[in-house]
Image (tube, rainbow, N blue to C red):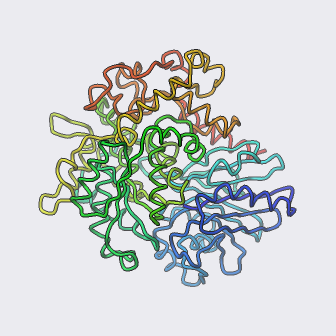
Amino acid sequence: MCGILAVLGCADSSLVKRSRIIELSRRLQHRGPDWSGLHCFQDCYLAHQRLAIIDPTSGDQPLYNEDKSIVVTVNGEIYNHEELRAKLKSHQFRTGSDCEVIAHLYEEYGEDFVDMLDGMFSFVLLDTRDKSFIAARDAIGITPLYMGWGLDGSVWFASEMKALSDDCERFISFLPGHIYSSKKGGLRRWYNPPWFSECTPSTPYDSLALREAFEKAVVKRLMTDVPFGVLLSGGLDSSLVAAVALRHLAKAKVARQWGSQLHTFCIGLKGSPDLKAAREVADYLGTFHHEFQYTVQEGIDALAEVIYHIETYDVTTIRASTPMFLMSRKIKSLGVKMVLSGEGSDEIFGGYLYFHKAPNKEEFHSETCRKIKALHLYDCLRANKATSAWGVEARVPFLDKQFIDIAMDIDPEWKMIRRDLGRIEKWVLRNAFDDDQNPYLPKHILYRQKEQFSDGVGYGWIDGLKDHANEHVSDAMLMNANFVYPENTPTTKEAYYYRSIFERFFPKNAARSTVPGGPSVACSTAKAVEWDAAWSKNPDPSGRAALGVHAAAYQEAPEKTLATENSSSLDGRPQKLQDAMVEATATATAL
C-alpha cells in the first residue's frame, strides 16, 4: 500500500504551503517508506508515499501521460494493467508500474474508465489542461480514502484521516465504488453490480464455477516483484487462500524471482486456537510457516498506537486490529512487503455465526449485501491500515469483483445454514473445495467452525481487554457517557476506553462521524440483531455472543452495558451515516 495526499484549489500557493503539504504527506510515510513524490501545478498539489511492489526501480509517483498534462497519484494495484496496456497501443508508457495505465485510460476514454480497472485502488487525477480533477475509490473500499474541504475553498483527498484532519474544516470517508468529478460536481457511483439492489437472486449453485472464480482471484493477486506470503489463521478462508496460492505459485512469474516456497504467518496468544490450526494447515500444505506469539499485556500496550493508525473506535475492529498490527511488524522485519489475506468471505457467504438465526433466504441475502457495503468501515479498514502501519500490503482475493458477482448471484437458499441437511455456515464454499481426488485441505479444517480473528488469537485476549477497560473506566463514567459522547455513545466500558483514546488523536466532530455505530451481536448489523430477542440483552461483537451457536459461547451477558437505554438512538446508524456522507458531499460541492 502507498499513501496519497492531494490538495486542489489552495488560496496559498507559496513555498510555505508546499512545505506544509510535504509535512502532512509525511504522516503517511508508514504506508509508503520506499520513496516520496510531489507534483505542484499552480494551486494544486499531488503527493505520494510509495511502497514499491510492482516495478520497484522506475515506478515512482506521481505518474503521468506522455506530455505530463495528466498527473495521477495512486494507492493500489491494477491486476489487469497488462491487458489494459494492450488496448492503448498508441500510448507510450514511461514505467512498468501497473498504476501508470490510469493516466492513459483517462486520456483515451475521459472520466468513464474506472469500471475497466480490475484491482484495489484509490487515486486522484489532475488534468492540467483545464485544472479539472477526479478522485475514485475501488468497488468495495479495500483501499482507504478520505475527502475534505478547507476554509479557503480547497478540496482535499488523503489515504488516511490524519493527513487532512488538522487542515480541513470538514472531512468524510470517501464512499467505495464512487467517483468525484470537479467538472460534474459531487459523488456518483461507478460500481453498479446486480446484488447492490439487494433483490434475491435465483441462480442455481455451481460449485465448480465458484471454485474456478476463486482460483482466478488468487492467481491474479500473485502479481508482485517483491517477496510475499499468506496470513494463515487456520480457519477456512485463510487456509483456502494458502492452498490455492500454493497450487499456482510454481507457474507464477514471482516464483522465477523469489522461488516457489510459500511463506505463511500466524499470531496468537500461547495455546490459542489459531496457532494450533494454522500449524496443522501449514504442515499439511508444506509451507514455510512463521508463528508469532504475543501476550495480552503486549497487546494492551499497543492499543493507543493501533487506534492512531486504524482511525476508528469500533470495538471489534480494534480487537482484531491489534494482533494484526503486531504481526505485520514481525512480517516486515522478515523482508516481506505483501501478504494475501482472507477478508470478505464471511460477508459474502454469511459466515458469521449469527447467520444461523436468519429467518429466511431473503433476510439472509439482504444481510450479506449490507455487510459487503459496510466492509470499508470494518474489515477492509482493519486489514489495510493494520498492515500498512508497517509498510506491508494486504491483498484480499475474496473481494475480487468477478468472484463477488458469481458468489452473490447464487440463490441464497444454498447459503442458508441447514443442520438438517448437514450444512454449516459457508457450506457452499466448503463444498466447492471438498475434493476427495485432489484435496485442498483436511476435512476437519475444511469444516472447522467459524472463529472471528479477535477470538481465534485466544479467548483470553478479549477477556483481558475487558478487564483492562474495567480498571480505567468507572461506573459513573459509563453512566454519563451520553453526555460526554452524545454521538455514537459507547455502551460498554471497553467501548468507552477506546473512544477516549480516539478522541485524543482525532478530536473533531468530522472524525468521530467517520466511524459507524449501532448494536451488534457477533459482528451483525443492527438490523440482524432483530433476528433473536435474546441478542438485544447481549450486544457484544465477539463470535462467542452468538448464544446457542458458538461452541464456546458466553453463558450470560459478558459485560454490563447501556444498550437498552441507548438502543433507540443507535439503531440503524450505519445507514444514516452513509446517507449523511452523500448529502454532505453534495452540499459542500454546491457551496
At a point 67% along the width and 57% down the height, the residue shown is 181
Image quadrant where residue 16 sits:
bottom right
Residue 40 locus on image (x, y percent): 77, 67
Drawn side of residue 470 relative to residue 94, left or right: left
Q: Which is nearer the eye, 574 or 591? A: 574
**Position of the C terminus by quadrant:** top right
Q: Position of residue 133 (x, y in %)?
A: 70, 62
Q: Report the front residue among 470 and 479.
A: 470
For this rendering, which residue is in front, 242 or 306?
306
Count of numbered marks:
0
Which residue is drawn at the image coordinates 50% and 60% (left, top)? Answer: 392
Is 96 placed left or right of 221 in the picture? right
Is the N terminus in the top left, top right, bottom left or bottom right quadrant? Answer: bottom right
- Of residue 319 and residue 526, the one placed in the foreground of this image is 319
Q: Identify whether 497 is placed above or below 138.
A: above
Residue at the image point whose x is 69% and y is 44% from the top: 171
The x and y percentages for residue 292 are: 38, 52
- Note whether 198 is above or below 72 in the view shown: above
In terms of image quadrants, where is residue 481? Answer: top right
Seen in the image, is 516 located left or right of residue 22?
A: left
